[in-house]
Amino acid sequence: GIQVEQSPPDLILQEGANSTLRCNFSDSVNNLQWFHQNPWGQLINLFYIPSGTKQNGRLSATTVATERYSLLYISSSQTTDSGVYFCAVETTDSWGKFQFGAGTQVVVTP
Amino acid sequence: DAGVIQSPRHEVTEMGQEVTLRCKPISGHNSLFWYRQTMMRGLELLIYFNNNVPIDDSGMPEDRFSAKMPNASFSTLKIQPSEPRDSAVYFCASSLNQAGYEQYFGPGTRLTVT
């Protein structure tokens, strides 16, 4: 099956800092989503981004499908950005089945 | 708009007991997914339905687990008998259709089996 690798595994940021999270995948994908799992355990949709670039406030994401990676940018981080960020992908061979990465644990300190 | 609804939010039960988790997908969504999250294995897909029909149950760990979707607005995941290793957070998600569409997750059910 497809391999999904996220880096870094952990990230500690001072409030106001910028950061980049990476998701590498081993096969062609027809669906890619970024999620934020907050400290209460909720999985919140950030981006549906099988290709291209999207922005939502301080967050933006870029997927380069031909090179099999996606990036999530957090700018001017806030303490509410703390949590785990997951990348999930679906391939044409795994129709309907998401494979999640192990996540990046982000801690933003005041 | 209501999102995906799951109940109960927390369940504590003793080993050997039957556990039933419930999910109501977003209205109009044709696909429903059950996931399990543990520290050891992360987030893994257990089973998914499209138009109320089970499409892929290859992630269901063993025969003690079963899932049903009797109609478009309700699904259950049942564990009988439960074991301590079933302790995890169980998420339900839904999407417009089974592939290539954004999935939306419910708040999860935290199951503890003692």
Image: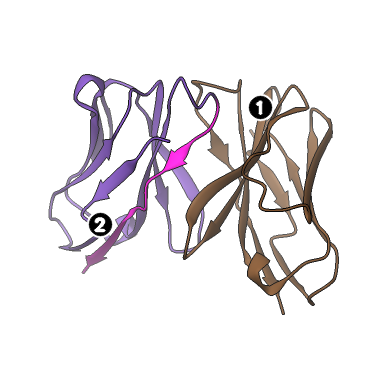
The N terminus of chain B lies in which quarter of the figure?
top right
Q: Is residue B25 left or right of residue A50?
A: right
Single out the mark in the foreground, 1 or 2.
Answer: 1
Q: Position of residue A55 (x, y in %)?
A: 26, 29
Q: Give residue A78's mark.
A: 2
Range of magenta residues:
A96-110
Q: Residue at x 33, y 58 (%)?
A: A80
Q: Quadrant of residue A74?
A: top left
Q: Which of the chains is purple?
A: A
Residue at label 1?
A: B31
Q: Is residue A7 above or below residue A65?
A: below
Are there few (<14), some (14-19), or many (20+) residues within 10 Å of tag 2? Answer: some
Closer to the camera in the image, B80 or B77:
B80
CA distance separating discs 1 and 2:
35 Å
Closer to the camera in the image, A109 or A5:
A5
Q: Residue at x 78, y 27 (%)?
A: B52
Q: Is residue A19 left or right of residue A84?
A: left
Q: Give residue B108's mark.
A: none
Q: Is residue B8 above or below residue A59?
A: below
Identify the colour of chain B in the image: brown
Q: Residue at x 64, y 69 (%)?
A: B85
Q: Is residue A93 above or below residue A110?
A: above
Q: Position of residue A34 (x, y in %)?
A: 37, 39
